[in-house]
Image (tube, rainbow, N blue to C red):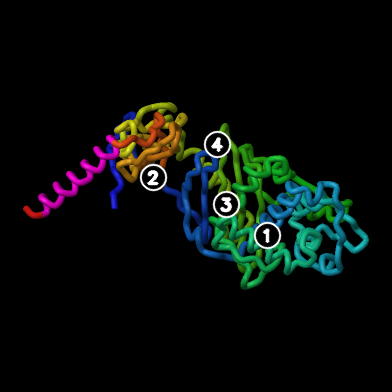
Amino acid sequence: MIAPRLIAFVLALTVALPAWAAFETRGTAAYIYDVTTGTVLFETNAETPLPPASMSKLMTLNMLFEALRDGRVTLETEFQVSTKARLMGGSTMFLDETDRPTVLELIKGIIVQSGNDACIVVAEGLAGTEDAFARLMNERAADLGMTGSTFVNSSGWPDPNHRMSMRDLGILATRLITEFPEYYGYFSMAEYDFDGRSPANRFNRNPILGLGIGGDGLKTGHTQEAGYGLVGSALQGKRRVVFVVTGLDSRAARAEESERMVSWAFRQFVERSAMKGGTVVADAEVWMGNHTQISLVAPEDVTLLMPATNAEITAGRVEYRGPLEAPISKGQPVAELVVPRDGLEDARIPLVSDRDVARGGFLPRLRTAALVLFRQALGQAQSLR
């Protein structure tokens, strides 16, 4: 087997500064993700399935948004309210069997009022029963790579088998933001009261809305078992951050921790330009082609998220399984530039071929075969020493 080729490549150097301040959370589990660059900034117990409380309503909204996108319903579609929905406890829209709420009203009721009754109405309207809807939620979660989630209801009502990981909630939040921008604005609504029935429950509980820090979503959660939690997102300039935290002991703690997470994510990390598109990073050997070598280039401008107090981009390594074998198309991804970052996962940047390489004729193939035999003989000779 041909081993991966590792090639050192020096990037632009800057002055190294003191180490950056790591984050410490008061929650039992947390996850912070930079959506703009696809970088996990912080996680603790993020893979552990935990009771999500009302934060799992985001999955019900995802299922509803997908139904809107597929044309199965519209914002004006009216749903029937069952007795089961009317009898649902906790936070509600105070729906009854005489109501025919529209999809738009239900979206607002779930986001702002955290309506458990609204979730059951959506589940029954889309799948017939809440149990059937939960099965669909589980199937969809698996499709989306949410490996730490198991749903048994549509609202997050306490159940020992209803669980989500903070990572999965982060995946879900990112999806709602990026895949459904036409509906995402509803998450920043400050208040909503369906038909004037619940003035005491009309205010959005999300503590980062209106703080002037770019907070615009997504969903709070609270039960005795779960504690206080939040799936939040904030946009500052061109950078968007998603964060998830759970296990806090009060609304005040949730508000304080949420603001701390947003501030840390934006103040401790900055974007740095690493290279321009078309920059030649390294050369790679090609076998069986009408060229014996190609250049590995960045397909587009590369910007990396780095710790603000240690924004040094020192060096990277090029990884590819080589030598590369023809045919190769210009622009085809054939390698990766791996850049280490202090305290973060390595950045992996795809590199592409700078040219087309057709499969060679008889002589190039003969030359390649001879080179393979020579290298094998050389390796055997060295092993005998």
Three-letter code for the amino acid on which mark 4 is drawn: Arg
As measured in the structure, the alpha-carbon distance from the residue carrying label 2 to the one carrying label 3 is 20 Å
Give whichever of discs 2 and 1 has the lower sequence position: 1
Residue beneath disc 4: 239
Disc number placed over residue 171 in the picture, else none: 3
Which residue does the numbered mark 1 point to in the structure image?
54
| Mark 2, other Cα within 10 Å: few <14 / some 14–19 / many ≥20 | some
Q: Is residue 220 visible?
A: yes
Q: Can you say whether 186 is above or below 153 in the image?
A: above
Q: Which residue is mark 2?
A: 346
Q: Amino acid at mark 1?
A: Ser
Instruction: Residue 145 in the image: state x and y as whole percent.
Output: 55, 56
Q: Residues within 10 Å of mark 1 (few under 14, many from 20)?
A: many
- In space, the residues marked 3 and 4 are separated at their CA atoms by 17 Å
Q: Which SS class for mark 2?
A: strand
Q: Nearer the viewer, mark 3 or mark 1?
A: 3
Provide the residue span drawn in magenta.
Answer: 363-383
